[in-house]
């Protein structure tokens, strides 16, 4: 993060305090600005900057959510590689772990049932 970005964030934080002060005072914007020696145009300029920064922050947070999570799925990370069985080609079983839960499913376990279990667990996490 560059100096100009840090400066902008600092100014936005300062103006956020100013806006809160105005709200807490119950004064009209014009009266508050006059009392504080702030031009009305400057007040609204920084209000717009603050709103944009808040919107950008929300958009960034939402972009971290994958399309799959929006459709009711959650990312599943394998904590260990699938174990290969000597007697059967392919995957013998799979382990899925979240912070609190561990699911072990054999290769013949119905995928739709496993998906239902993952959905229910993701609601709890």
Image: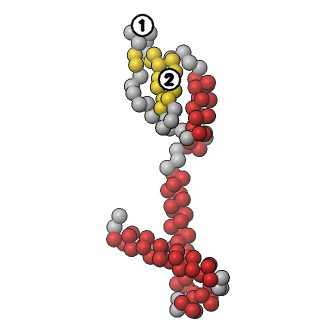
Q: In the displayed image of the protein, which residue is found farthest to the left?
A: 3
Q: In the image shown, does 45 or 79 lie closer to the viewer?
A: 79
- Looking at the image, which residue is at 58% across and 35% down? 121
Give the left or right position of residue 12, taking residue 113 as reference.
left
Image-based side of 69 in relation to 5, left or right:
right
Please name the residue that numbered disc 2 is placed on: 104
The residue that label 1 is drawn on is: 87
Return the residue nearer the eye: 123 or 4. Answer: 123
Cβ atoms at labels 1 and 2 below 8 Å apart:
no
Using the image, tell me which numbered label, if any, was put on residue 76.
none
For the view shown, which residue lies furthest in the front direction? 100
Q: Residue at x 53, y 57 (%)?
A: 59
Say which label, 1 or 2, has the lower sequence index.
1
10 Å crowding of disc 1: few (<14), some (14-19), many (20+): few
Residue 91 position within the rendered picture, expressed as x and y whole percent measured from the top left: 45, 18
- Horizontally, residue 82 falls left or right of residue 26, namely left
Q: Quadrant of residue 119?
A: top right
In the image, 75 versus 122, the foreground residue is 122
Element under label 2?
Answer: strand
Dot in front, 1 or 2 = 2
Q: Residue at x 39, y 74 (%)?
A: 7
Measured along the vertical axis of the image, is residue 89 above or below residue 113?
A: above
Q: Quadrant of the N terminus?
A: bottom left
Q: Position of residue 115 (x, y in %)?
A: 59, 29
Q: Quadrant for residue 113, please give it.
A: top right
Q: Quadrant of residue 117?
A: top right
């Amino acid at each position: 993060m560059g100096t100009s970005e840090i400066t902008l964030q600092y100014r936005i934080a300062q103006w956020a305090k100013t806006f809160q002060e105005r709200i807490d005072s119950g004064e009209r914007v014009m009266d508050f600005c006059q009392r504080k020696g702030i031009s009305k145009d400057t007040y609204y300029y920084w209000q717009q900057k603050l709103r944009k920064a808040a919107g950008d922050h929300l958009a960034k947070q939402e972009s971290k959510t994958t399309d799959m999570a929006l459709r009711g799925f959650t990312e599943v990370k394998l904590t260990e590689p699938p174990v290969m069985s000597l007697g059967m080609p392919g995957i013998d079983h799979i382990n899925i772990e979240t912070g609190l839960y561990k699911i072990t499913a054999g290769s013949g376990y119905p995928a739709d049932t496993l998906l239902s279990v993952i959905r229910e667990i993701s609601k709890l996490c």
